Amino acid sequence: MAEEKPISSTTKRSYWRWSKTDFFPETSFQTLSSYKTALSQTCPRLSDRLLARSSSTDELVTLQKVSENPMQKCLTWWDLIWLSFGSVVGSGIFVITGQEAHNNAGPAIVLSYAISGLSALLSVFCYTEFAAEIPVAGGSFSYLRVELGDFVAFIAAGNILLEALVGAAGLGRSWSSYFASMIKNDSDFLRIKVDSLPVGFNLLDPLAVVVLLVANGIAMSGTKRTSWLNWITSLVSGAVIVFVIVFGFIHAKTSNLEPFFPYGVEGVFRAAAVVYWSYTGFDMVANMAEETKKPSRDIPIGLVGSMSGITVVYCLMALALTMMVKYTEIDVNAAYSVVFEQIGMNWAKYLVSICALKGMTTSLLVGSLGQARYTTQIARAHMIPPFFALIHPKTGTPVYATLLVTLISAIVALFSSLDVLSSVLSFSTLFIFMLIAVALLVRRYYVKDVTPKNDLVKFLLCLFITIGSSIGVSALWNSNERGWLGYTAAGLLWFFGTLGMAFLSKQRVPKVWGVPLVPWLPSLSIVMNLFLIGSLGLTAILRFIICSAVMIVYYLLVGLHATYDVAHQNELSA
């Protein structure tokens, strides 16, 4: 194996470089012959890396050296609160609420938001414990790599990148649609139709591309600058939301809440699965841990505090909407804009429209920060070329990683319609949230070479029962089975599986901040995320399987050999 250059000489190299060594420095890719040799060893290498786990030290120290320059520690809990607000409070609350209240939940949409908010908050708890103890840019990728091993982390990494690309493209298309609707009552007004392309990919959206380029350009210029811009613009959003809630309740009529459950309990849960996307985005803020001054203090305050407040705000906004007009009269496309027209406040609809547009813009800004940092840590681990892990010495930001996400998401946004993008995004997000809850349980109950074998077997059995019963509940619900017997059996299995874990000895105690009521809260997060995954339908599941198959092919051809070389290189140098 060729001897590595000292770090001091590496750091003197120009940031703007482009060579084969920068993309594929590993031994397996030096020559065609070495690559053939690596491929011939795929099975033993896969056996070696399948359950290999990283360590907190590797994620915090060793991998960061790949970036050559450090990220700047410039964020406080105040920044994180507003970054969370800016990333989460986007177009979802303004667009989805009316659609789901009208079609699925009626006035009970407030309960849908409460259920989804609880599920999101459970995931926030899990993220926060990890982020406080492993404050790196990789977020869930690093947490899974430490607790569940390289292979699971790679599948998560693929879904993280898919979520990043599809999420950014979807926001760009939404921004374009909303802006076009403000000019003319046609969301496709600014798009170019190409009849030769298949439906769903035949409306080209150059404005979405421009919006993505601008947002990511700002994110590349500096983290603190982006945070300040987000904070200032989010104050405007906050003021408009207060206006909506206050004037909504002033013009409210309790008679509009009857009937409260026009579509039954099923409608409430169907709506909850959809409005959940109004809460997504907080995981991007967890990725800012490496740039946070005091992560053990700032991250719990920033994430838990902001998401608790956002849940309350969403419930109040949903309740105000359904009390202002009858749910059957709510406009499904622009609910809050039209409802003010319906009560005679025509000028207010423009205020709401601007707020929704601003919300999408800040979601793009914070998303740009988080997505690039995910990509950086994945590149540091050599699962994608380490070239994308390089940090710019002046801006302290991952310019190459940001450019990668920007360019691919811009291409996707140019061609793909929102309905094609949404189901892929939904599955990836919930799948990762579910894995994080599993990883937290593993972190608490299993420490290598410390946990007795009998305790490990008991823990794995309890975990298997918990996950299996959660899948069972989701399968029953989506098969339209409403008898009490099946749910009682699945519920009891979940309860006893979790109870079994509760009686086991915990092998690790959080040093700074931990999720309360372990294993109950993580277990509840697992069942809620799997329940929502099951609500997405067969198409989303098939798309997820296809995407995962492509990821596995890449892993067997490239990612496996790169990570194997790095792991064994580190062992030799240790």
Image: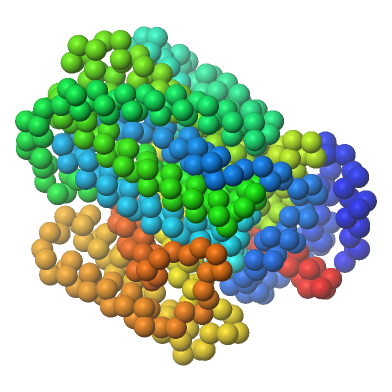
Q: Nearer the viewer, residue 205 or 246?
A: 246
Give the residue at x 28% y 43%. Answer: 113
On screen, residue 570 versus residue 383, left or right, reads right
Q: Position of residue 383 (x, y in %)?
A: 66, 55
Q: Quadrant of residue 100?
A: top left
With respect to residue 210, does 265 lie above or below? below
Q: Residue at x 29, y 25 (%)?
A: 244
Q: Nearer the viewer, residue 421 or 135?
A: 135
Quarter of the image for residue 530 reads bottom left
On screen, residue 184 above or below 433: above
Indicate left or right for 490 with 366 as reference.
left
| Image color mode | rainbow
Q: Residue at x 16, y 55 (%)?
A: 480
User: Quadrant where the N terminus lies?
Assistant: bottom right
Task: Decide: is 414 above or below 33.
Answer: above
- Image coordinates for residue 311, horizontal then vertical, percent: 33, 43
State whether residue 498 appears in this view: yes
Q: Quadrant of residue 522?
A: bottom left
Picture layout, residue 524 above or below residue 411: below
Q: Is residue 401 left or right of residue 478?
A: right
Whether residue 424 is visible, yes or no, is: no
Q: Position of residue 49 (x, y in %)?
A: 64, 70
In the rendered view of the protein, which quadrant contains the C terminus? Answer: bottom right
Q: How many marks?
A: 0
Residue visible at 53% across and 41% down? 78
